[in-house]
Amino acid sequence: MSVGTSAKPKYKKRSQIAMIWRRFIKNRMAMIGLILFAIMLIIAVVSPLFINYETDVIQQTISERFMSPSAEHLFGTDQFGRDIFSRVLWGARISMSVGVAVVIISLIIGSILGAVAGFFGGIADNIIMRFMDILLAIPGTMLAITIVAALGGGIQNLLLALSIEQIPKMTRIVRSSVLTLKTQDYIEAARACGTTNARIIYRHIIPNAIGPILVQASLTVARTIISVASMSFIGLGINPPEPEWGAMLSEAKNQLMNYPYLVVAPGVAIILTVTSLTLVGDGLRDALDPKMKN
Amino acid sequence: MDMPLLETKGLKKYFKTGRGMLHAVDDVNFKIFKGQTLGVVGESGCGKSTLGRVMIRLLDATEGEVLFEGKNIMDYDKHQMAEMRKELQIIFQDPYASLNPRMSVSEIIAEPLKVCKIATSKSDLEARVFDLMKQVGLAERLVNAFPHELDGGRRQRIGVARALAVEPKFIVCDEPVSALDVSIQAQILNLLMDLQDQLGLTYMFITHDLSVVKHISTEIAVMYLGQCVEKAPSDELFEKPLHPYTQALLSAIPIPSLKHRNMQNVLSGEVTSPIEPKPGCRFAARCPYAKPECTGKNLELKEVSPNHFVSCIKFQ
Amino acid sequence: MSEKLLEIKDLSVVYHTEDGEVYAVNHADLSINKGETLGLVGETGAGKTTTCLSIMRLLPEKLGEIISGDILLNGESIMSKSEAEMRSIRGNEVSMIFQDPMTSLNPVYTVGDQIAEVIQIHNPNYTKEQVEKRVDEMFLMVGLPAERKTEYPHQFSGGMKQRIVIAMALACEPNLILADEPTTALDVTIQAQVLQMMKDLKEKLNTAMILVTHDLGIVAQTCDSVAVMYAGEVIENGTVEDIFEGENHHPYTVGLFGSIPDLTSKSNRLHPIDGLMPDPSNLPKGCKFSPRCPHCKDICKEVEPPVIKNGTHMIRCHLYK
C-alpha cells in the first residue's frame, strides 16, 4: 500500500503559528495588550496623514500658550502654544521607531553572540560572556549617558547607546536557552544521524529558543521606550523641538504647579505603551509553550 | 568464526571534573554479532549510557577502538563518519526529551531521511514516513500530531521510527522502556524484538532492570563503575551468576511470586565514586566476600566457561 | 479479627480542570487493618496518588474535590474534620512518603533540623534535649549514623535521602504510612535495602502502610493485601495469596502479570495489554476496561460490572457472575 503517492494529502498539516495564535487569543489580558499596542502602532504610522509636522508639531504660536484642553486642542497646548495632542501622536512615531530599531539591533547581535557562546562553549563562550559581564556591571542608564556624553547627542548615538545597553541582556537570554536546548536528547538524536551544526541550529535550536527570545524582545521594546524617555528627560536623548514623550515631560516639569495637565498626555502615552507590550510579552510566553493545551 | 558486527578494544572514556578524572568507561572489551542483542546492565553512574554513546561515536573515546565490520570508526574523518551514521542509531530513555516539541510526527521521522538524503522525491519521502509509522505501529492519522499530544508509549514508537528511518544495522537502546508503564513497556519490548526478527537488527540494550534485559538479550554484560565485571549468554547469567555483584543484582529484583518472599540477600553500602578509582576490584567495598587481596591490583575479565567471562579474584 | 484502621467507602474524586472534569477516582472501596501493608497497584493515572491525597485531605485546593464517599480513620470520619484537626492527624496519625526523595527535602536546612521540626510540631512540650535525642533515635532506626544529622540534603545519596524522608514520616509514630512509589527513583540494590528496612520498621513499630506501586514484584515481597486500581476504580482486591495464587482474576490483573518479564520462564514474548488507559475526562460506559479487554462481551460495554466477593477476594467483572 502506498499512501503517499496520491496528490492530495490525506491528513491536513497543522501550522505551529496557527496553534500559537489560537492559544494567544484565548488569553484576555494579552489580547487587550495586543489591541492597545496595535492601535498605537497604527496611530504612529498614519499620523502624518492628518498632522502636519511643520505647522502642528513644532511651530510655535505664542498667542496660544497654555490653553486648557478643549475641542480644538484635545489635550491643550504647551508653553510654546503647540498642540499637545498632535505632539503626543507624533511622539509615538519616535518612541516606537527607536524601540523597534534597538530591539532589531540588539536581537541580531545578541542572538549571534549568545548562540555562538552557548553552542560552541569553551574559549568563545568565555571571551563573549566576560565582555558582556563588563557591560552588565555598569548600570544601564549610566552606560548610555556616558556614551551619549562622549559621542554627542543625536538619534544615531542614542540608538547606539541603548543597543549596547540591551545587547548583554539579549545575549544572556539566548545563550542560556541554547545551553539548555543543546543537551536535549533530540539534539543528540539529530547528531546521531549526521545532522550538521548549521541544520541543528536552524531546525532544532532556533524554533525552540524563539519563545524566550520573542518575550525578551517585546519587553526590550518596552524598556527602551522608558530609556529613551528618561534620556530625553535629562536632555541627552531626542532634542527639542522634536516631540519625544520624555522630552515633553521634561519641558512640562517646570510648569507642573501651574499647568499640571501638560504631563498627563505624554505620561499616559508612556504607561500605555509599556503596559501593552508587557502584557503581550507575558501572553507570548504562555502561548509559545508547546506543552500548553489548545 | 564470523567477524563481529561491532567490537570494542580497550575502550575508555574519562571526563574531567573538579575533583579529578571521572572514569565513566574503563577498559571495556566485547564483541556483538549480527542479529544479536547485547544487554548492558548496571546501576546509575556505572557508565552504561556513556558506553552506548561512545559506541556510536556520539562521544569520542579517550582511548581504545570501536571496530564496525572490522574498521575502527574512531579513526574516521568527518565525511566517513557521516556515511557511518546511517549504520549506527540510538533510541533514548526519555520519550519526552528525545522529540523536538516544535516538530510534528511526520517531520520528526522525515528529518533523518532528509539529512541523509535517502528519499528520492517528495512522494517517496511521504511514502517512507507512512511505511515507518506502520512498521512501529503508529496509526496514520497521527502523522501531523505533535509529541506533547501523545502518551509515552506512542512517543517511544516515534523514537524507534526515527532510528529505523536510515535503515541502520546497529541500534543502541538506552533504557528505552524504563520511563514507561508496565503494560506499555511490554508493547515496546515486543516491538523491538519483532523489528529485530524482520530487519536483522543488532542491538545494544542498556538498562538498569535485569528482568527486562533477559527477554531481549542474547548476551548480557554487567557493568560496575565503568568496568564490565561479568559477561555471559543471557540464560547462563541468570542460572549461574558468578560475580558477587551480579548475584546481588539478581537477588535484588522483587519477584512477583509469593514463593520467593524473604529470599533476598540485601547488599549493604552504596556505589562508590567513579572519580580517580583506586586499583583493584571496584566492588570490593560492598562485596560480602571481599578479602584483602581484592584491592591493589586490577583484575582481568577471565573466561571461566565457554563465553562466560568474569572479573573476580575467586576466578583468577 | 484484627481491627480496622482505615476504611474508604465509595470514594469519588473529581478534578475540575480547564479542559473539563477529570474523574480520577470512581467509587473506590478500600480498607486496611492495624499493622497491615496494603499494596495499591496500578499504572499512571489509575488514581493511586489521588486516593492517598484524599486520605490526607491534601487534594489541590479548588481543583480537586471529593464528590462522594467517606473516609473513616479509627472508625471516625475525617470528612467533617476541621483543617486544624487535620493538621494534627497528618504526621501524628497518618504520614506520607513521596516518590522523589530529591524534592521532598528542603535544601537549605540540615536534615536533622528537618526531622526535629516534625517532632516539635507534634510535641510542643518537648525540651530541646528530648527533641535531639529523638532525632538521633530516628537516624539510628533508618540505619544512618546520627552524626550526619548536621549535613544538608545534597550531601546524601538518593537512597540515604529516602531513608531520611522515611525517618521524618516515622518520627511521630503514625499508625498509617502512605508510601507513594517510595523506591521508584532508586537503583535496584538500593531499592532492596530501603524496602527491607521499611519491612523491618513496620514490624517493629506495628505501623500500617499503604504502599503505592506499579511493581507487582514489590507487592509480592512486602504486602499483606493488594488492591488493583484501573481508571479510578478498585477492580480487584484481596490478600496477597488471593491475588498471586488465586484462580480467578480480573482480566486487567492478568494483563499486568503478562506484561512483566518473567525471570523463571524461558519464553521470550511478553503478553502486554493492547491499547491505552482511557482518558479520565471521557471514560467509557459500562466496564472501564472493556475497550482493552480480551473477554469483552456486549454487557460489559453497557452495564457497570458488579462486585463479586469470594471470601476476602473481590473482583469487579462480569466474567465471574
Image (spheres, coloured by chain):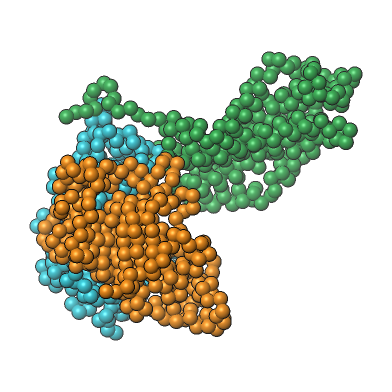
Q: According to the colouring, which chain is green?
A: A
Q: According to the colouring, which chain is orange?
A: C
Q: In the rendered view of the protein, which quadrant contains the N terminus of chain B?
A: bottom left
Asked whether residue C1 is in view, the answer is yes
Q: Nearer the viewer, residue C290 or C320?
A: C320
Residue occupying the point 80% across, 28% down: A240
Q: According to the colouring, which chain is cyan?
A: B
Q: Nearer the viewer, residue B59 or B156?
A: B156
Q: Nearer the viewer, residue B292 or C110?
A: C110
Residue occupying the point 54% across, 52% down: A126
Task: Pinpoint residue C99: horizontal percent, then vertical percent.
Answer: 38, 62
Asked whether residue B46 is in view, the answer is no
Task: Pinpoint residue B18: horizontal percent, then vertical percent.
Answer: 47, 65
Q: In the rendered view, would you say A45 is above or below B263?
A: above
Task: Pinpoint residue B304: horizontal percent, then vertical percent.
Answer: 14, 72
Q: In the rendered view, would you say A42 is above or below C3?
A: above
Snapshot quadrant of residue C58: bottom left
Q: Left of C235 or right of it: where is A20?
A: right
Q: Left of A91 or right of it: where is A197?
A: left
Task: Pinpoint residue C293: horizontal percent, then vertical percent.
Answer: 19, 47
Q: In the rendered view of the protein, which quadrant contains the C terminus of chain B?
A: bottom left
